[in-house]
Amino acid sequence: MSLVGMIVYTATLDQGHLWVVFITAGSLGFFMTGYLPLGFEFAVELTYPESEGTSSGLLNCSAQVFGIIFTICQGKIIDAYGTRAGNIFLCVFLLIGTVMTGETVKLLRGLDLISFI
């Protein structure tokens, strides 16, 4: 839903109706914030023998690093090509993250099946 929210936000940004932008930005924040605790739990499951603090700390650290990188890159893209191109840049990486998450879940289901046998 975060990807859908970002696409809708990108599409409504240039419409000229501020209330539409507020609603789409609110829904985008709602769905992205809900993904955070799921990501932490998922990281804990992936790194099971290790402590929960280690995986959460590494996840927070990588979020900060990637946040800085994406902020700088999007700023340069917006300066050169405009806001729509900057938001499309973020949509592409949300799509990549969605695909990677889906593939990881498939991998985990396969590992559960192997450990069951």
Image: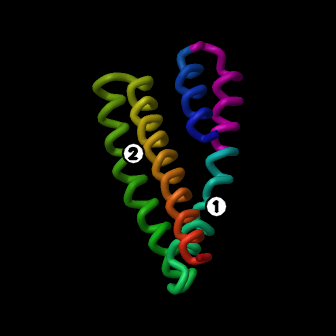
Image quadrant in which you'd find residue 6: top right
| Residue identified by numbered label 2 | 71
Query: What percent of the width, then of the height, locates residue 109?
Result: 58, 63
Figure check: 85 above or below 16: below
- Name the foreground residue: 27 vs 48: 48
Q: At 30% from the left edge and 35% from the top edge, which residue is drawn?
A: 76
For label 1, count other residues whose C-alpha is less than 10 Å away and answer few (under 14), some (14-19) or many (20+).
Answer: few
Q: Is residue 87 left or right of residue 26?
A: left
**Please, what is the three-letter code of the amino acid marked with disc 1?**
Leu
- Name the foreground residue: 27 vs 106: 106
Query: Dot 1: what SS?
Result: helix
Image quadrant in which you'd find residue 78: top left
Instruction: Say which quadrant the C terminus sits in.
Output: bottom right
Q: At 47% from the left edge and 39% from the top edge, which residue is drawn?
A: 95
Query: What percent of the width, then of the height, locates residue 74?
Result: 37, 38
What is the image's colouring? rainbow
For label 2, count other residues whose C-alpha is less than 10 Å away and answer few (under 14), some (14-19) or many (20+).
Answer: some
The answer to whether one can see residue 56 in this image is no
| Magenta-tinted stretch | 15-29
- Name the foreground residue: 9 vs 107: 107
**Main SS type for the magenta part?**
helix
**Please, what is the three-letter code of the amino acid marked with disc 2?**
Thr
Instruction: Say which quadrant the N terminus sits in.
Output: top right
Residue 27 magenta-drawn?
A: yes
Residue 42 magenta-drawn?
A: no
Query: Dot 2: what SS?
Result: helix
Q: At 53% from the left edge and 51% from the top edge, which residue is drawn?
A: 102
CA gap between label 1 and label 2 equals 23 Å
Figure check: 115 above or below 25: below
| Residue identified by numbered label 1 | 38
